[in-house]
Image (cartoon, helix red, strand yellow):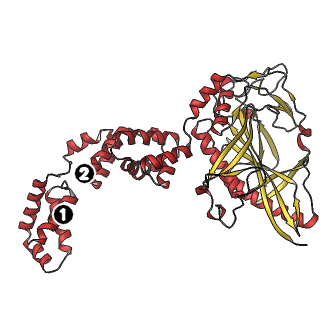
Amino acid sequence: MSIDKYEITIGCEIHTQLLTKTKAFCACENRYGGMPDTRVCPVCLGLPGAMPRVSKGYVELGAVAGLALNCDIASYTKFDRKHYFYPDLAKGYQITQYDIPLCSDGFVDLPFSHYPEDERPGGAKCRATNFAGGGCIIDGKYRRIRIERIHLEEDVGKSLHLEGRHSYIDYNRCGTPLIEIVTKPDLTSPDEAALFMQTVQEILRYVKVTKGNLEEGNMRCDANINLTVWEDGTEWHTPISEIKNLNSFRAVKDACTYEAARQLKEFQEDRQEFNPGFKVTMGWDEAKGQTVVQRTKNSFVDYRFVVEPDIKPFTVSAELVEAASERVGELPEAKRTRFKSEFGLSDFDVETLTSTRELSIWFEEAAAAAKSAKRVANLILSELLAVLNEKNQVIGDVAVSPRHIAELADALEDGKITSKQGKEIFAEMLASGSMPSYIIKERGLEQVSDAGEIERLVAQVLAENPKAVADFKNGKTNAVGWLMGQVMKLSHGRANPAQATALLNEKLAHL
């Protein structure tokens, strides 16, 4: 027998910590790091008699995340207990949501421009045009990945394995508010799974519900993966593997790539088939570059879900949902599309200018106050971001405002200053906080564009440099550049270069 072809099916479960001030069900500070076991209380440690209380901010941020990912928000919901034993789970159960999640039926549209070229429509690896599960292509530009649900739950503690001999538990993370984003099995490649996680991170950072810092564990992904294999005309499905706690985009891609190859080899060797109630939990050994079996489980039976008896079911008000919607605002991809059509910017320009919400707002304020949005974009991209990257700062750290950039852009657009002078003014503006108009006036930098004054400058240079004029007449065309340099020198760099060059060429042509 021979394998005709196979396809990969992936569903993601992304766990994301939220930016609330306190933990999900107690008043302990929600902050990363610090001395182990110092930000805990009887509630997050699950001590007898301690009663959890739902943080309103937790539910609000969960709703913001859900709306940003195009979900419906439940008007009535509740919490449940998910039972399992693990050393870092102090209570022996996790407070989560089972059958009535806060958010459901959402989606994320992945732009084809973000895909590797061979995975775009028509590419060698593209399987996105027609696949089981109901995902689809939108407007010929996007792959829609459906989100089944987003539910609220608390994080657990952190196991620390030191020196190869001892393990410790830091309970500071216990009770940290999480959302779990569960997709439909719509992802068709490891690259697409990594892109999905990256897109979700961008959106959730944009609406300020999470730091999304993968290194700190603010966002982690469990990838559920199996294969559909066609062998001699017969269709087979391999068992699902769940690869746990992938904390980088590269890890998502590499782990899914390895696991797909492992499942194919396993299928060829012993024909293990899909069982809807059976799943293998895998870990990712990054150092070895391979997945490793951690345990097997049979669906939800292992967890013994029950309704959380210490937290009453509650309603989600229309006012809360409306406030959450206002916080979402315009999302990155919609903003990129608008910037391209409204300001005539390139794909690269809009990708960079919308990399953070703060930067996009800053640019738009500057563009609204300037004559040329393109000129504003160029100043931000070539000058301002270079400084921010060099100093490892963000847009809010600089002393200049959008008005500074708009005024400098107008001075360049009107030809009052040269591009070289623009760089000098930008540096001084950044250092002093002075407006460009003030710097131009104080330093006497305003470009000379008066036709009569430029004609006087050109005439004087021609009169004082007869040898260069003679060289030009004898066919030495580089004499023009030298003469132009003398015009700029005589004007102290203030002559309008375009006007001066045109007039110089005209005078030389008639000599």
Residue under label 2: 415
- Residue at the spot of label 1: 502
* The N terminus sits in image quarter: bottom right
**x, y percentage for residue 464?**
6, 67
User: In the displayed image of the protein, which residue is found farthest to the bottom?
Assistant: 474
Q: Does the image show residue 428?
A: no
Location of residue 408 in the rendering, given as x and y in whole percent from the top left corner:
31, 45
What residue is shown at x 80% (from left), y 59% (from top)? 259
Regarding residue 261, the answer to whether it shows in the image is yes
**In the displayed structure, does residue 406 sit left or right of residue 303?**
left
Q: Which of 136 and 26 is in front in this view?
A: 136
Is disc 1 surrounded by few (<14), some (14 to 19) or many (20+) residues within 10 Å? few
Which mark is first along the chain, 2 or 1?
Answer: 2
Which residue is pictured at 63% across the width and 44% down the height? 201
- Give the answer, above or below, for where 238 lies relative to 330: below
SS assignment at label 1 = helix
Q: Position of residue 220 (x, y in %)?
A: 71, 45
Q: Which amino acid does label 1 sit on?
A: Ala
In this rendered view, identify the residue nearer to me: 95 or 141.
141
Real-space CA distance between mark 1 and mark 2, rounded to the nearest whole angstrom: 15 Å
- The quadrant of the image that shows the C terminus is bottom left
Callout 2, which amino acid? Gly
**At 65% across and 40% down in the image, what residue appears?**
69
Left or right relative to 2: residue 389: left
> Label 2's element?
loop
